[in-house]
Image: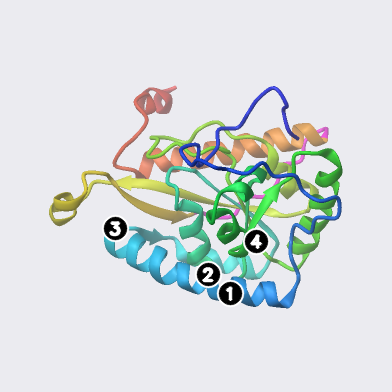
Amino acid sequence: MTNKNHKVEHDYDVVKNVKEIKLKKDYTFFNQNPFFKLGSFFVVILIKIFVYFIYGKLFSGLRIRGKKNLKHLKKDRFILVSNHVHVLDAIWLGSLIFPRKIYVTMLQSNLGLPYVGNILRIAGGIPIPETKEHMVHFLDELKTELSKKTPVLVMPEASIRPYHVGIRKFLSGAFRFAADSDAKILPFVYVYKKPNFIQKIYSKKPRLHLHILEPVEVIQGETRQKTYALTRDKVHQIMSNYFNEHSDLKEENYETKSND
């Protein structure tokens, strides 16, 4: 699962004093403690008010499209996937789905971030383990949560690249989780919209709109690895095409690709 020769870019590389994190042998990834869950509920309420509504929707111009597709979360188990273009994109997505519980996978090293690490964990952040031993427990707990129809968000691009135009290459982890847990994939795509006259006064950056697409089922291949790859490539194609069709900013070679 983890390539030891390749270090995934940290979402918060500019942050200093990041502690090195080593998980305990019996680490619980999906905390079932009722007090932890209660604390998580209130933390997410505050996040939804201040980070989602005030900063996201009022100040940053965040808009949501395709909310009708959230109804699918009630019927099946889902792995959610999204492009990773803003430091708050996963938080906005989770706040949108609240009060339905959602878990968000993150780098294990994120737990070492001063203050932020604890907040992310309480709000529903699940560290992706770096050892095979922990990965076995992680996958078992993941299957249990998905069986309860609790959605889990995975960023298949892995690292953040602020305001990147287009959908970057996907890692296979999200699609492995879906295939091995008999889950479907619900894609979310952040697209860019040009700021209006008033918005240009305080920010020149494009506005982010979050679009929710139709569910995608796992494509079965001849082997497990083939299944992961086929599903990954299919979802990437769907999200990439959707981004270029609906975003005001498009990949430079999009027209060439479309005509091939």
Residue 79 percent location from the top left of the image: 65, 53
Tag 1 residue: 41
Q: Nearer the viewer, residue 8 or 20?
A: 20
Q: Mark 4: few, some, or many residues within 10 Å (few <14, many ≥20)?
A: many
Give the main secondary structure, helix, strand or loop, of the magenta stretch.
loop
Q: Nearer the viewer, mark 4 or mark 2?
A: 2
Q: Residue at x 62, y 47 (%)?
A: 112
Labelled disc at residue 151: 4
| C-alpha gap between disc 3 and disc 1 | 25 Å
Tag 2 residue: 44
Q: Is residue 65 above or below residue 235?
A: below
Residue 105 percent location from the top left of the image: 64, 51
| C-alpha gap between disc 1 and disc 4 | 16 Å
| Mark 2 residue type | Val
The image quadrant of residue 236 is top right
| Mark 1 residue type | Phe
Q: Mark 1: few, some, or many residues within 10 Å (few <14, many ≥20)?
A: some
Which portion, as a residue range, is magenta?
Answer: 213-223
Q: Earlier in the sequence, mark 4 or mark 3?
A: 3
**Does dot 4 land on a helix, a strand or a loop?**
loop
The image quadrant of residue 259 is top left
Label pair 2/3, CB-CB below 8 angstroms: no
Q: Earlier in the sequence, mark 1 or mark 4?
A: 1
| C-alpha gap between disc 2 and disc 3 | 20 Å
Q: Earlier in the sequence, mark 4 or mark 2?
A: 2
Q: Residue at x 82, y 33 (%)?
A: 222
Left or right: 59 in relation to 115:
left
Tag 3 residue: 61
| Mark 4 residue type | Pro
| C-alpha gap between disc 1 and disc 2 | 5 Å
